[in-house]
Image (cartoon, grey):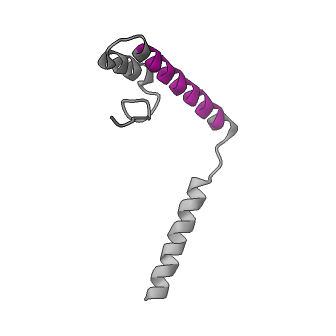
Amino acid sequence: MKKMASALAALALAATFSIAHAQHSDKQTKEDVLRHRAMASAHEAAAKCLESGKKEDICMKDLQASCKGLAVGKYCGMKHAH
């Protein structure tokens, strides 16, 4: 029974790695690059907004608007703690 469980665990792990390492097409890679650049631009704008002295809630609303449909979550795929 332990050998079967070990074999199943190894099979599941192998499947996970093969899925994780699946290659994107050139088109998908280019789209990912553009998405990352857009997210970086939105975060840079949020940083500049905060540096300018505007209130955090205003800057976060701007960030959310910039990231709508771009990334997972309302913080453009990235949220830090404080």
Residue pictured at 53% horizontal, 21% vertical: 41
Q: How many marks?
A: 0
Foreground of the two, 70 or 56: 56
Q: Spot the residue most to the bottom.
A: 1
Quadrant location of the C terminus? top left
Residue 68, given in percent of the width and then of the height, sits at 41, 24
Residue 1, given in percent of the width and then of the height, sits at 43, 89
Residue 72, given in percent of the width and then of the height, sits at 42, 35
Residue pictured at 53% horizontal, 67% vertical: 13
Q: Spot the residue most to the right.
A: 26
Task: State the predominant SS element of the stretch in magenta.
Answer: helix
Residue pictured at 47% horizontal, 15% vertical: 48
Q: Eyeballing the image, is 81 above or below 59?
A: below
Q: Is residue 53 magenta?
A: no
Q: Is residue 47 magenta?
A: yes
Q: Eyeballing the image, is 50 above or below 72?
A: above
Residue pictured at 53% horizontal, 61% vertical: 16
Residue bounds of the magenta highlight: 29-49
Residue 64 falls in which quadrant of the image?
A: top left
Residue 32, given in percent of the width and then of the height, sits at 59, 34
Q: Eyeballing the image, is 59 above or below 73?
A: above
> In the picture provided, is 36 more to the left or to the right than 54?
right
Residue 21 falls in which quadrant of the image?
A: bottom right
